[in-house]
């Protein structure tokens, strides 16, 4: 994979590409994880930092399909609150909250349908991008005024009791990439050759890469490429340390290690998204395209344990939503006084969330707990 330098002025990727090229010329090649961090989170030119970050233009998430996703999540969060003894206050910390759309769905529904839970709720939307945080104020004004909503750039350092959850956060964290060459672990760096950004193999930039695979008992074959998202390990460890009692719930696409590091994924899973076109041109448009990789749920489990998080369950999004929705036959899909044709449309949108061909089987929900005996939670009960 290569990308032309220098860049034409009209190219939205030009400013970041020029910065990266200058930096690599001065200091040498950078690990791919470093490149990905700049592409997504450079304060000015990163994909998620720009005002125009192409929501809907490049990709959509479950949140965008229908508010039922947030409503059923609210039901799961309310049940977690009850299982923990209905504490007051109860922190719900949404990590990677984006523009606050999911927060609005959860809070609007809780205020209307789950008043006791809403009364206990302290919702914190954690979002690294200032441009995205700025969009929370209007959407969540009612809940902020009621003292139920606030936002932050990072997870609070101490959460006495609550649930930290995320939807499509972990897949958006910068990841290292490795290749096995003659039986040895090598890392993919981004360098420059003949005026182009190119991938270069070097010695691993950190001993943590070797530890990552060893700790999970993963053996990669010669020639295989793979990701090792050390930032996800760090993130779950930090989340576990911040939480004294409660749950961490991670919703994302991905697999357990055994299903991720195999022949099927032997080129890795990193992809670029731009205008709903998926490609492997990872170096093509720094800062102007989304980059994302499949989550390794085994690593999230293993590194979570270091901070006292125990696995409660890993189920598909389909199992999770159906288990939560079936109790009232998905009545939460509808608005009061809705016409039959609108109800039908809502049912079709629900299908997209739970159907194997849609998001239902691609996405998984991992629930971890801390400071509480194995509970029975509807969402992770299977059906
Ligand atoms: C793929 S988007 C998902 C947004 C939203 N959760 C949704 O489902 O629509 C990932 C979001 O996580 C944010 N993010 C990435 N790393 C973060 C971190 N360490 N802390 C907080 N937010 C982060 C990004 O800025 C981006 O808004």
Image: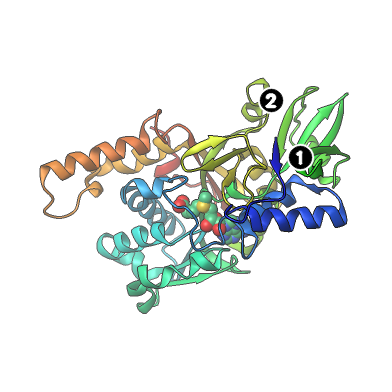
Q: Is residue 170 above or below residue 356?
A: below
Q: Quadrant of residue 142?
A: bottom left
Instruction: Tell me the SS state at disc 1.
Output: strand
Q: Is residue 33 left or right of residue 322?
A: right
Specify whether tag 1 is near ligand 1 (CB below 8 Å): no
Residue drawn at the location 80% of the way across and 57% of the way down:
23
Residue drawn at the location 74% of the way across and 45% of the way down:
32
Q: Quadrant of the N terminus?
A: top right
| Ligand 1 quarter of the rendering | bottom right
Count neighbours of disc 2 (C-alpha within 10 A) and say few if under 14, some if 14 to 19, many if 20 or more: some
**Number of marks drawn:** 2
Residue on which disc 2 sits:
266
The structure's colour scheme is: rainbow
Residue on which disc 1 sits:
198
Q: Quadrant of the C terminus?
A: top left
Residue 130 percent across, percent down from the top left: 54, 68
Q: Is residue 214 left or right of residue 75?
A: right
Nearer-the-camera pick, 83 or 19: 19
Residue 273 percent across, percent down from the top left: 53, 42
Q: Which mark is residue 230?
A: none
Q: Is residue 51 left or right of residue 68?
A: right
Q: Quadrant of residue 26?
A: bottom right
Nearer-the-camera pick, 258 or 276: 276
- In terms of sequence position, does the residue under pointer 1 or pointer 2 come before the other? 1
Residue drawn at the location 87% of the way across and 56% of the way down:
27
């Amino acid at each position: 994979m290569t990308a032309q330098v220098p860049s034409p002025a009209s190219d939205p990727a030009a400013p970041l590409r020029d910065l990266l090229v200058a930096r690599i010329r001065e200091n040498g090649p950078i690990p791919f994880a470093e490149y990905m961090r700049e592409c997504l989170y450079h304060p000015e030119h990163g994909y998620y930092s720009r005002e125009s970050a192409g929501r809907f233009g490049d990709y959509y998430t479950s949140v965008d399909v229908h508010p039922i996703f947030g409503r059923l999540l609210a039901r799961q969060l309310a049940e977690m609150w009850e299982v923990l003894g209905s504490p007051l206050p109860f922190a719900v910390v949404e990590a990677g909250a984006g523009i606050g759309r999911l927060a609005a769905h959860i809070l609007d529904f809780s205020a209307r349908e789950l008043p006791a839970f809403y009364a206990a709720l302290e919702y914190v939307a954690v979002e690294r991008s200032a441009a995205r945080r700025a969009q929370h104020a209007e959407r969540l004004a009612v809940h902020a005024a009621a003292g139920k909503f606030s936002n932050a750039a990072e997870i609070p350092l101490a959460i006495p009791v609550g649930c930290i959850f995320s939807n499509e956060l972990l897949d958006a964290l910068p990841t290292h990439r490795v290749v096995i060459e003659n039986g040895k672990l090598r890392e993919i760096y981004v360098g420059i050759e003949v005026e182009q950004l190119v991938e270069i193999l070097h010695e691993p930039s950190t001993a943590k890469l070797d530890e990552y695979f060893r700790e999970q008992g993963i053996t990669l074959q010669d020639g295989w490429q793979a990701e090792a998202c050390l930032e996800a390990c760090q993130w779950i460890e930090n989340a576990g340390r911040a939480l004294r009692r409660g749950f961490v719930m991670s919703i994302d696409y991905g697999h357990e290690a055994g299903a991720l590091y195999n022949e099927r994924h032997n080129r890795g899973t990193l992809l670029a998204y731009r205008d709903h076109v998926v490609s492997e041109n990872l170096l093509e448009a720094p800062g102007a395209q989304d980059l994302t990789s499949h989550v390794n749920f085994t690593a999230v489990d293993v590194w979570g344990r270091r901070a006292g998080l125990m696995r409660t369950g890993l189920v598909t999004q389909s199992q999770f939503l159906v288990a939560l929705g079936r109790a009232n036959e998905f009545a939460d899909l509808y608005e009061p006084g809705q016409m039959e044709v609108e109800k039908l449309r809502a049912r079709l949108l629900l299908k997209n969330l739970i159907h194997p061909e849609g998001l239902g089987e691609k996405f998984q929900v991992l629930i971890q707990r801390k400071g509480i005996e194995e509970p029975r939670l509807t969402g992770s009960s299977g059906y």
